[in-house]
Amino acid sequence: MHTFHTPLDLVRERSPERPVALVRQGAIDLAARWFRKTFKGDVLYAVKANPSPWVIRALCSAGISAFDVASLPEIALVAEHAPGARMAFMHPVKSRDAIARAYAEYGVRTFALDTHEELAKIVEATGGAADLNLIVRLAVETSGAEYALAGKFGVAAHDGPALLLAARRATQDLMGVSFHVGSQCLRPSAYQAAMAQASRSLVRAGVFADVVDVGGGFPSIYPGMIPPDLIEYMAAIDRGFADMMVHEETELWCEPGRALVAEASSLLTRVELRKGDALYLNDGAYGSLFDAAHSKWPFPAKLVRSDGAASTNLKPFSFFGPTCDAIDRMPGPFWLPEDVREGDYVEIGMLGAYGVAMNTRFNGYGAVDTVAVEDPPMASMYGLAPRSIPTPRYDHEATVVKMSRSRGRKRRRR
């Protein structure tokens, strides 16, 4: 992978035609080491957040040796780039073939489930193996997440005890519980509340858990979203675990995705056309900007111009992607110099999570180049950059921008 000091150096040398994922490997190394040092248990990287081979290798180099996988292709990816790593198949609904191959070909022993039917499927597909680690996904009631994940997965509280008891009887190895408080969780206490609910289910079932998996949901920084310090999440989990009805050897797991990789990559796009306050880019909703389009997240943006200075006055823009579909639109606002023009490049920050992972090949687009850069991310939970992203406010009468911190501002969500 070629390395440039800054995105501007890349633009001046190559004038890239395709979108470019700008990799900051130091950011992923720092995040991984922070979690390993601070979380009092096993850290499993949620591969779905960013399945790029360089991410898997970088995490291994930083000491992450366990991975939360959701499909056979993710299992094969980890096996190729992290040989010998431990994998947990944490998707609660899997095909029989996927279960059997994961167990027999890749040595996967940990499987999540949230129904009696899935439990029977796992047992049958593995030939009634005695060395299964069965993790029961519980539905929990929490608040404070930007993406609420309740509804699709998780056994309801009134059905949980029976499933926990059945899972306990189905394995001679580990049985555990897991849950997900929601993606980009901004309330540390949500973890403690979910652990209390899990503990009640275990007590009603009359079983002890060998594993308590608090899932993912750990946040990163975006405009309008300034999370509490991650140490507050660790403290809430410690309190929750201390209050749970578990035995002395119960293991604690977590599955961070976004918090490990969000800062580690941004996206460099090119302006193909300006139409008023709308910029037409060479990447969009069907590429790495899925969240910007469908969840309307206003990711931070910077102008990268190879020749001449840009205006110091900022104004809000919306983006359109390169495809022919009208929904390929990112409303923003994305704050950029008012004189942005065709041929300029725009760096869109904090896209290491759920960026390139969302790419499609619709209309023939979606190909992304990858280079390393050495400048810091636009914001950081780990001290590499400021702990917030200023949100500009545009004064249309004076045509000036007033910068203000965005803590506590409410944003319209879908």
Image (cartoon, helix red, strand yellow):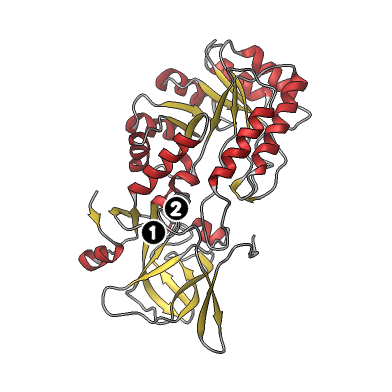
Give the residue pinned by disc 2: 355
Amino acid type of disc 2? Gly
**Residue toward you, 405 or 391:** 405
Residue at 42% from the left image edge and 34% from the top image edge: 73
Q: Would you place residue 107 above or below residue 254 in this image? A: above
Q: Are marks 1 and 2 in contact (CB under 8 Å)?
A: yes
Q: Can see residue 160?
A: no
Q: Earlier in the sequence, mark 1 or mark 2?
A: 1
For marks 1 and 2, give the CA distance.
8 Å
Location of residue 401 in the rendering, given as x and y in whole percent from the top left corner? 51, 80
Q: Tag on residue 189? A: none
Residue at 68% from the left image edge and 22% from the top image edge: 116
Residue extending farthest to the bottom is 397
Q: Would you place residue 206 above or below residue 338 in this image? A: above
Residue at 35% from the left image edge and 31% from the top image edge: 82
Q: In this view, does 408 lie to the left or right of 315?
A: right
Give the residue pinned by disc 1: 267
Location of residue 245 in the rendering, given as x and y in whole percent from the top left corner? 70, 22
**Residue toward you, 37 or 54:** 37
Q: Would you place residue 63 above or below residue 142 in this image? A: above
